[in-house]
Image: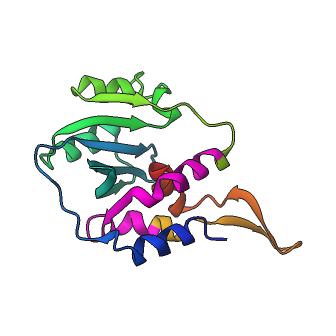
Amino acid sequence: GTIFADELRSATAEDRIGKFPHTPGVPVHVFWDMGWSDAMCQLFMQPFGTRMRMIDYEEYTHKTTAYCATEAQKKGYFFGTHYLPHDGDAEERKTGKTDAQILRGLGLTVKVIPRVKDKSISIRAARDIFHRVEFDEEKCSDGLQALRHYRYEKDEARNVYSKVPYHDWASNGSDAFQ
Protein backbone atom coordinates (compact mmCIF):
# COMPACT_ATOMS: atom_id res chain seq x y z
CA GLY A 1 0.00 0.00 0.00
CA THR A 2 2.99 2.37 -0.03
CA ILE A 3 2.15 5.06 -2.56
CA PHE A 4 5.59 6.12 -3.87
CA ALA A 5 7.49 2.83 -3.37
CA ASP A 6 8.28 2.26 -7.06
CA GLU A 7 9.30 5.86 -7.60
CA LEU A 8 11.63 5.82 -4.58
CA ARG A 9 13.20 2.52 -5.71
CA SER A 10 13.90 4.07 -9.12
CA ALA A 11 15.31 7.23 -7.55
CA THR A 12 17.67 5.11 -5.44
CA ALA A 13 18.76 2.93 -8.38
CA GLU A 14 19.37 6.03 -10.53
CA ASP A 15 21.41 7.81 -7.81
CA ARG A 16 18.83 10.58 -7.47
CA ILE A 17 19.02 10.31 -3.68
CA GLY A 18 22.42 11.50 -2.51
CA LYS A 19 24.40 14.70 -2.11
CA PHE A 20 22.63 17.56 -3.88
CA PRO A 21 23.68 20.78 -2.13
CA HIS A 22 22.23 24.26 -2.49
CA THR A 23 23.56 26.21 -5.49
CA PRO A 24 23.96 29.91 -4.60
CA GLY A 25 22.24 32.37 -6.93
CA VAL A 26 19.68 29.88 -8.23
CA PRO A 27 16.13 30.55 -6.97
CA VAL A 28 14.80 28.19 -4.32
CA HIS A 29 11.09 27.46 -4.51
CA VAL A 30 9.32 26.30 -1.36
CA PHE A 31 6.41 23.87 -1.30
CA TRP A 32 4.36 24.05 1.90
CA ASP A 33 1.83 21.91 3.68
CA MET A 34 0.06 24.02 6.29
CA GLY A 35 -0.46 22.71 9.80
CA TRP A 36 -0.54 23.41 13.49
CA SER A 37 -1.17 20.15 15.34
CA ASP A 38 -0.28 18.33 12.13
CA ALA A 39 3.19 19.33 11.04
CA MET A 40 3.71 22.39 8.88
CA CYS A 41 6.15 21.27 6.20
CA GLN A 42 8.44 23.10 3.81
CA LEU A 43 10.16 21.34 0.91
CA PHE A 44 12.88 23.47 -0.71
CA MET A 45 13.48 22.90 -4.44
CA GLN A 46 16.02 24.30 -6.89
CA PRO A 47 15.68 23.73 -10.63
CA PHE A 48 18.78 22.22 -12.19
CA GLY A 49 18.40 21.85 -15.95
CA THR A 50 15.45 19.52 -16.43
CA ARG A 51 15.83 18.21 -12.86
CA MET A 52 14.15 19.38 -9.69
CA ARG A 53 16.53 19.21 -6.76
CA MET A 54 14.96 18.88 -3.35
CA ILE A 55 17.76 20.47 -1.34
CA ASP A 56 16.18 20.90 2.09
CA TYR A 57 13.14 20.04 4.18
CA GLU A 58 11.71 21.36 7.45
CA GLU A 59 8.81 20.37 9.69
CA TYR A 60 7.30 22.40 12.51
CA THR A 61 4.52 21.67 14.99
CA HIS A 62 2.69 24.39 16.90
CA LYS A 63 4.59 27.17 15.11
CA THR A 64 3.11 30.11 13.23
CA THR A 65 3.47 30.67 9.52
CA ALA A 66 5.53 33.80 10.21
CA TYR A 67 7.88 31.81 12.46
CA CYS A 68 8.39 29.09 9.82
CA ALA A 69 9.00 31.67 7.09
CA THR A 70 11.50 33.55 9.25
CA GLU A 71 13.38 30.31 9.95
CA ALA A 72 13.45 29.62 6.20
CA GLN A 73 14.83 33.10 5.51
CA LYS A 74 17.70 32.42 7.93
CA LYS A 75 18.97 29.75 5.53
CA GLY A 76 20.15 32.52 3.22
CA TYR A 77 18.54 31.08 0.08
CA PHE A 78 17.52 33.31 -2.84
CA PHE A 79 13.80 32.55 -2.86
CA GLY A 80 11.62 32.17 -5.91
CA THR A 81 7.99 31.28 -5.22
CA HIS A 82 6.42 29.87 -2.08
CA TYR A 83 3.67 27.44 -3.11
CA LEU A 84 0.87 26.98 -0.58
CA PRO A 85 -1.97 24.46 -0.65
CA HIS A 86 -5.56 25.65 -1.00
CA ASP A 87 -5.85 26.37 2.73
CA GLY A 88 -3.16 29.03 2.39
CA ASP A 89 -6.05 31.37 1.52
CA ALA A 90 -8.03 30.48 4.66
CA GLU A 91 -8.28 33.26 7.21
CA GLU A 92 -6.51 32.46 10.46
CA ARG A 93 -8.59 33.06 13.57
CA LYS A 94 -5.91 34.69 15.71
CA THR A 95 -4.61 37.22 13.17
CA GLY A 96 -7.53 37.56 10.77
CA LYS A 97 -5.03 37.13 7.91
CA THR A 98 -4.42 34.26 5.54
CA ASP A 99 -1.10 32.41 5.45
CA ALA A 100 -0.58 33.82 1.94
CA GLN A 101 -1.07 37.38 3.25
CA ILE A 102 1.37 36.75 6.11
CA LEU A 103 4.06 35.49 3.73
CA ARG A 104 3.49 38.34 1.28
CA GLY A 105 3.81 40.73 4.21
CA LEU A 106 7.30 39.29 4.73
CA GLY A 107 8.17 40.20 1.15
CA LEU A 108 7.81 36.68 -0.27
CA THR A 109 6.27 35.73 -3.61
CA VAL A 110 3.36 33.37 -2.98
CA LYS A 111 1.11 31.21 -5.14
CA VAL A 112 -1.82 29.31 -3.66
CA ILE A 113 -2.55 26.04 -5.44
CA PRO A 114 -6.27 25.21 -5.82
CA ARG A 115 -7.61 22.12 -4.07
CA VAL A 116 -7.81 19.07 -6.30
CA LYS A 117 -11.17 17.34 -6.51
CA ASP A 118 -9.62 13.93 -5.97
CA LYS A 119 -6.35 13.14 -4.15
CA SER A 120 -5.46 10.67 -6.91
CA ILE A 121 -4.91 13.66 -9.23
CA SER A 122 -2.10 15.13 -7.10
CA ILE A 123 -0.60 11.68 -6.51
CA ARG A 124 -0.57 11.02 -10.26
CA ALA A 125 1.01 14.45 -10.90
CA ALA A 126 3.73 13.69 -8.32
CA ARG A 127 4.40 10.32 -9.96
CA ASP A 128 4.61 12.00 -13.38
CA ILE A 129 7.48 14.27 -12.28
CA PHE A 130 9.24 11.89 -9.89
CA HIS A 131 11.73 10.73 -12.58
CA ARG A 132 13.05 14.32 -12.72
CA VAL A 133 13.48 14.75 -8.96
CA GLU A 134 16.74 14.52 -7.01
CA PHE A 135 16.82 14.53 -3.20
CA ASP A 136 19.58 15.64 -0.88
CA GLU A 137 19.71 12.56 1.33
CA GLU A 138 20.83 14.40 4.46
CA LYS A 139 18.81 17.62 4.42
CA CYS A 140 15.67 15.92 3.07
CA SER A 141 15.89 12.81 5.27
CA ASP A 142 12.64 13.56 7.14
CA GLY A 143 10.82 14.36 3.90
CA LEU A 144 12.10 11.14 2.33
CA GLN A 145 10.87 9.22 5.37
CA ALA A 146 7.43 10.76 4.87
CA LEU A 147 7.40 9.71 1.20
CA ARG A 148 8.55 6.18 2.14
CA HIS A 149 5.74 5.78 4.69
CA TYR A 150 2.90 7.46 2.77
CA ARG A 151 0.38 4.73 2.14
CA TYR A 152 -3.19 3.89 1.27
CA GLU A 153 -5.66 2.91 3.93
CA LYS A 154 -6.35 -0.82 4.08
CA ASP A 155 -9.81 -2.29 4.27
CA GLU A 156 -9.02 -5.24 6.53
CA ALA A 157 -12.45 -6.85 6.07
CA ARG A 158 -11.99 -7.11 2.30
CA ASN A 159 -8.16 -7.27 2.41
CA VAL A 160 -7.79 -4.49 -0.19
CA TYR A 161 -6.27 -1.03 -0.20
CA SER A 162 -8.54 1.95 -0.61
CA LYS A 163 -8.00 4.85 -3.00
CA VAL A 164 -7.65 7.19 -0.02
CA PRO A 165 -4.23 7.81 1.52
CA TYR A 166 -3.94 7.15 5.24
CA HIS A 167 -3.72 10.44 7.15
CA ASP A 168 -0.83 10.35 9.62
CA TRP A 169 2.56 12.04 10.08
CA ALA A 170 3.72 10.87 6.63
CA SER A 171 0.89 12.60 4.81
CA ASN A 172 2.11 16.09 5.72
CA GLY A 173 5.49 15.90 4.03
CA SER A 174 4.01 13.91 1.16
CA ASP A 175 1.36 16.59 0.64
CA ALA A 176 4.10 19.24 0.47
CA PHE A 177 5.76 17.15 -2.27
CA GLN A 178 2.50 16.88 -4.16
Q: Quadrant of the N terminus?
A: bottom right
Q: Is residue 149 above or below residue 89?
A: below
Observer-nearest residue: 109 or 125? 125
Looking at this view, name the residue that lies furthest to the right: 158
At 57% from the left and 61% from the top, the residue drawn is 168
In the rendered structure, the answer to whether residue 156 lies left or right of residue 41 reads: right
Looking at this view, name the residue that lies furthest to the front: 50
Q: Which residues are magenta?
A: 121-145
At 89% from the left and 72% from the top, the residue drawn is 158
At 34% from the left and 46% from the top, the residue drawn is 63
* In magenta stretch: residue 130: yes
User: Looking at the image, what colour scheme do you see?
Assistant: rainbow
Q: Main secondary structure of the magenta part?
A: helix
Which percent across, then down, holds residue 88?
A: 45, 32
Q: Is residue 98 above or below residue 13?
A: above
* In magenta stretch: residue 96: no
